[in-house]
Image: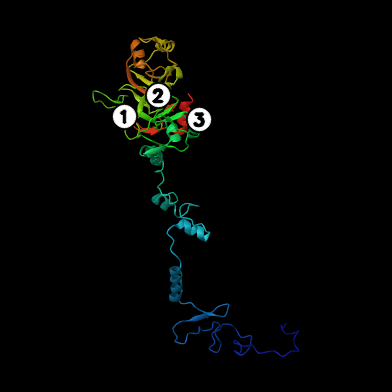
Amino acid sequence: MSRDNNNSGRPKKPRSSTRNSDSPRAPRSGNSSDSKSFKKPFSRDTDGSKPFKKTDSGRSSDTSYESRMEKKYAKIEKEPFVSNQSEERKSSGKTSFKRGGAGKSSDTRGKYERGSLKYGRRPGSETDRDDDRARSFVQKRRFKKVEKDVHKDTIRLNKYIANSGICSRREADDLIVQGLVEVNGQVVTEMGYQVQKTDKVVFDGQGITPEKPVYVLLNKPKGYISTTKDDKARKTVMDLVANASPYRLFPVGRLDRSTTGVILLTNDGHMTKKLTHPSFDAKKIYHVTLDKKLTNEDMKLIAEGIRLEEGIAIVDQISFIEGKPRNEIGMEIHIGWNRVIRRIFQRLGYEVEALDRVMFAGMTKKNIKRGHWRILTELEVNNLKML
């Protein structure tokens, strides 16, 4: 049966291989020469050099490779150059990542090569060097503060009394008002009175000096003696602290020539007498190295007390040093007899090969290299006065 049986009333249209080009249903592609191409040809500029295309907004834009590259490099030239990539990331608000490590910023390598730009130094260089510089700066500042008082021609009377170590300036004002201070034989009650260095000042019947107390802690090396002068021209501790103070200093106690460790030097006579007298109980701790191991029996004898020429040498504490061989001993004493530790061990048949004082009156040699010194802080001075 024919397909057109139901439409027999309608006239049949002839079939053709191609449709009319004028028809709205003309094919979009075809081989016929009469058919129109789908793509419209590019329109050119007036000089026929650059092709253009229309954008969504209706404006024409340059699409050639040369023009696109010119725009790209023109944009780069307009952007400012930033030397620090971290600052560039902060300004843009974006985080840049480097290949080979997720989350690592692109300036990680430069940070370790240039060092920390924030603190102006390289990593690892701010340990001992910065500590030494800070300590040396504090020492110079304290020394300059003392040196200013030395080079002055005159000084206020209350400061003169305070520098002598009697009391504070405020308390000195009360003493002056009470008429307890004499200058060149005359009682002075005037506030702010200026005293010359050649004047003689008397307080409570005793002459005083205007030297400000200075306290210097020295880590004494081997080969120096603890005296101000030596007839045999040997090296003294004064050679090591020659630049520590403009005033004349004196060692507190003595360490023999072969003994090393902590020693205090000061111009405060009252403090010197206080620390050297056994009744004030100024503790001293020594690290003793013997020529052979110390037995437990001999250690008990030393703890009970060894009789010497001056009497029984009392040792507060004695023990072996943890982690050290049995010939290294720790001792704590408060007596100040000459070469007392060496003589104690010699009485029992031992020879002291090395002797180092690690603590004196609560002060240690921490952060002080051998042969170096430092000025005590106000807190340390107050602790000494409270002994």
Q: Examine the rendering and report whether any part of residue 46 can be seen.
A: yes
Instruction: Estimate the x, y position of residue 187 in percent, counting from the top left.
Output: 44, 30
Q: Pointer 1: what residue?
A: 238
| Amino acid type of the residue tagged 3 in the rendering | Gln
Tag 3: Cα neighbours inside 10 Å, few (<14), some, or many (≥20)? few
Residue 272: assigned label? 2
Is residue 33 or residue 251 the one in the foreground?
251
Q: Pointer 3: what residue?
A: 178
CA distance for labels 3 and 2:
30 Å
> Residue at coordinates 58% horizontally, 82% vertically from top-left?
28
Position of residue 129 in the picture relative to residue 62 (left or right) = left
From the viewer's perspective, is residue 331 above or below residue 235? above
**Dividing the picture into quarters, in which one does residue 193 lie?**
top left
CA distance for labels 2 and 1:
16 Å
Which mark lies nearer to you, 3 or 2?
3
Is residue 16 or residue 213 the one in the foreground?
213
